[in-house]
Image (cartoon, rainbow, N blue to C red):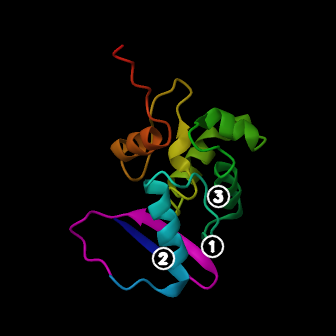
Amino acid sequence: MARIVGDSHGISSITVIDSNEKSSTKIPKCLQDCVQQLDEYFQKKRNSFSLKLNPQGTEFQKQVWQSLQQIPYGTTRSYQKQSEALGDVKAIRAVASANGKNPLWIVIPCHRVIGSDGSLTGYAGGLWRKRWLLEHENPPEQQSLF
């Protein structure tokens, strides 16, 4: 289940909530498209989003979040490569910090950023969710029994 916050200016926050938290059954009109697109993503009918976004953050954070949207569905990028793409290889820690403050989970795909050695590191929703999202987007191939 997700908590989606937004208004006529765009979606400002998407976070995963535990199923025991109270949720609203009435979805405001300005959030309905987001709910539909997330539903399509989880049904494997969508691999990109076309939503009006309005994340709140510093200019640097917004630049980092914009770069996250360039990582293709089903792929990953290391924090180092993300820093290089932003033009400053030494900014790895700042980039990782901005990723951690991403308010639009899934839509701005910070789950696609991994350690240089391929390890799963840092995800506000928990590493088990990060692993699940990566496997959802790029499931491991099953070997044929024949």
The amino acid type, in three-letter code, at marker 3 is Gln
For the residues marked 3 and 2, what is the alpha-carbon distance in whole angstroms? Answer: 19 Å
Chain part drawn in magenta: 6-24
Name which quarter of the figure residue 87 lies in.
top right
Dot 3 crowding, Cα within 10 Å, few <14, some 14–19, many 20+: many
Q: Height in image: 130 above or below 118?
A: below
Residue labelled with disc 2: 5
Along the viewing direction, whichever of 113 and 38 lies nearer the viewer:
38
Residue placed farthest to the right in the image?
Answer: 87
Label 2: how many Cα within 10 Å (few below 14, some 14–19, many 20+): some
Q: Which of the labelled discs sits on residue 61, or is there none?
A: 3
Viewer-closest of 55 and 50: 50
Is residue 8 a member of the stretch shown in magenta? Answer: yes
Return the x and y of residue 125 as percentages of the image width and height. 38, 53
Residue named by callout 1: 54
Which of pointers 1 and 3 lies earlier in the amino acid sequence? 1
